[in-house]
């Protein structure tokens, strides 16, 4: 099916669910306030805070409330672009399988979409929110989907039943969004140590190891997976990929970076992975930073900015490291490196190279910053340097 046709079907499906697309925060929140009472908003905010700071029962309680028929169309409309982005990626490959499991299906919005597209395939959606699944089943019945069923399974304490040749999981395997991941060897590199203790700790903290092990039991011997988790940051992507590889999951194709809007906010998500168990097609795992929006840099051609208040050059992306490494004959005037007991490092230095002064910052979670000014404005960088050093104390 052509992409345009698929997207149009998806838009019609989302509209049937009551979801609306917004590009303005003002318009979205005005609609939200018309739909919700102040008590509704207060309760949702309280549950969201508990979900963020609590355990799995708080998470289940949040999604149970979010599944209320008055609430879910408004709440999930924030994810409209997410569905428009992820939905076609999943739907395009469901036809390659016969028995498909959607792990962490929630309301079953995309599960029911795929089941409508592939009526000859068998779909099972599992989630641990019983209220979400009640809505999912009700909607599946309304759509007359006899090839789709749902099961309430808490994978933390239960095992999945059945065997599937395709398992889909999006934002379900590691929802610990606050976990920073694994630090690099030092502030000078993006490489991570292959430390089994660090890896096991990451998988335990995020719940990734337990969930992956359980869904692997339900994957057929040559089954495939489609995964998309919040692992855009390299510090989370590397241990996530290593967890997949350690369980004999191989890439079928290079991961696809995913971006979409949550109303006005641009969200960098994913990547989206297509994997196969024991595949002989060995696509290499990439543990380097992805291409970024850092300004191209040439030490021999540093042009004045259009705004004289701006630096000559500024880069807040990982590519700032390559630019810093190209500063010929740089002379470090002051530098400091803070090392925490757990090995994490933050480095900041102020220096000069012929005709210019620079400030460079780097840490072991892939954050980089390079600022270059002409000699006449060197005092600005001195002030900035001192502010950063005080912040490290």
Image: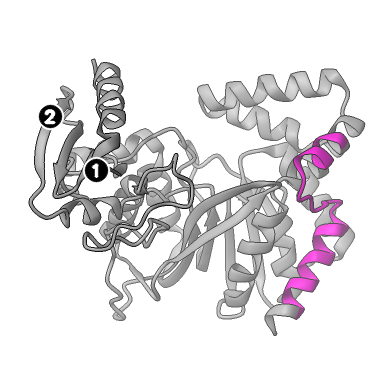
How many numbered marks does the figure carry?
A: 2
Q: Measuring 16% from the left and 53% from the top, which residue is drawn there?
A: 327
Q: Nearer the viewer, residue 143 or 358?
A: 358
Counting from the top left corner in percent of width and height, residue 183 is at: 24, 40
> Residue extending furthest front?
376
Q: Which residue is mark 1?
A: 199
Q: Is residue 342 left or right of residue 145?
A: left
Question: Is-magenta flag for residue 13?
Answer: yes
* Predominant secondary structure, magenta span: helix
> What stretch of residues is rendered in magenta?
5-30
Question: Is-magenta flag for residue 58?
Answer: no
Q: Is residue 23 above or below residue 131?
A: below
The disc, 2 or 1, on the residue closer to the chain's N-terminal end is 1
Q: Nearer the viewer, residue 306 or 132?
A: 306
Q: What is the quadrant of residue 334 in the picture?
A: top left
Q: Measuring 36% from the left and 36% from the top, which residue is drawn there?
A: 180
Quarter placement of the N terminus: bottom right
How crowded pointer 1 is (Cα within 10 Å; few <14, some 14-19, many 20+) is rated as: many
User: What secondary structure is marked by label 1?
Assistant: helix
Is there a contact, CB below 8 Å, between mark 2 and mark 1? Answer: no
Quarter placement of the C terminus: top left
Q: Nearer the viewer, residue 106 or 45?
A: 45
Q: Is residue 264 left or right of residue 185?
A: right
Counting from the top left corner in percent of width and height, residue 127 is at: 62, 45
How crowded pointer 2 is (Cα within 10 Å; few <14, some 14-19, many 20+) is rated as: few
Q: Is residue 132 above or below residue 234?
A: above
Alpha-carbon distance for marks 2 and 1? 35 Å
Q: Is residue 339 above or below residue 160?
A: above
Q: What is the quadrant of residue 385 in the picture?
A: top left
- Nearer to us of marks 2 and 1 is 2
Q: Which residue is mark 2?
A: 334
């Amino acid at each position: 099916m052509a992409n345009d046709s698929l997207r149009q079907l998806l838009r019609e499906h989302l509209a049937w669910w009551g979801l609306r697309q917004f590009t303005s925060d003002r318009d979205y929140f005005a609609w939200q306030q018309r739909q919700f009472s102040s008590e509704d908003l207060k309760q949702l905010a309280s549950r969201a805070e508990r979900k963020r700071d609590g355990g799995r029962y708080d998470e289940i309680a949040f999604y149970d409330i979010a599944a209320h028929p008055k609430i879910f169309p408004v709440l999930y409309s924030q994810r409209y672009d997410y569905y428009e982005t992820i939905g076609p990626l999943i739907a395009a490959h469901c036809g390659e399988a016969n028995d498909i499991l959607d792990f962490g299906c929630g309301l079953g919005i995309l599960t029911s979409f795929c089941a409508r597209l592939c009526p000859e395939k068998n779909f099972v959606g599992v989630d641990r929110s019983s209220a979400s699944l009640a809505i999912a089943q009700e909607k599946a019945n309304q759509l007359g989907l006899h090839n789709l069923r749902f099961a309430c399974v808490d994978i933390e304490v239960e095992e999945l039943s059945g065997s599937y040749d395709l398992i889909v999981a999006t934002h379900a395997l590691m929802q610990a969004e606050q976990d920073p991941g694994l630090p690099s060897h030092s502030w000078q590199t993006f490489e991570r140590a292959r430390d089994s203790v660090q890896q096991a700790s990451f998988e335990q903290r995020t719940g990734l190891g337990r969930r992956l092990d359980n869904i692997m039991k339900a994957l057929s011997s040559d089954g495939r997976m489609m995964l998309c988790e919040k692992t855009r940051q390299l510090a989370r992507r590397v241990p996530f990929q290593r967890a997949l590889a350690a369980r004999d999951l191989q890439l079928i194709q290079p991961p696809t970076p995913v971006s979409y809007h949550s109303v006005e906010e641009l969200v960098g998500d994913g990547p989206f992975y297509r994997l196969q168990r024991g595949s002989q097609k060995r696509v290499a795992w990439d543990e380097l930073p992805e291409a970024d929006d850092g300004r191209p840099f040439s030490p021999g051609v540093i042009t004045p900015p259009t705004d004289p208040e701006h630096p000559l050059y500024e880069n807040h992306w990982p590519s700032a490291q390559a630019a810093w490494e190209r500063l010929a004959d740089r002379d470090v005037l002051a530098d400091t490196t803070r090392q925490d007991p757990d090995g994490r490092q933050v480095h900041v230095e102020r220096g000069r190279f012929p005709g210019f002064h620079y400030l460079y910052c780097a840490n072991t979670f892939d954050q980089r910053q390079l600022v270059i000014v002409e000699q006449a404005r060197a005092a600005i960088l001195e002030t900035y340097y001192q502010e950063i050093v005080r912040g490290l104390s």
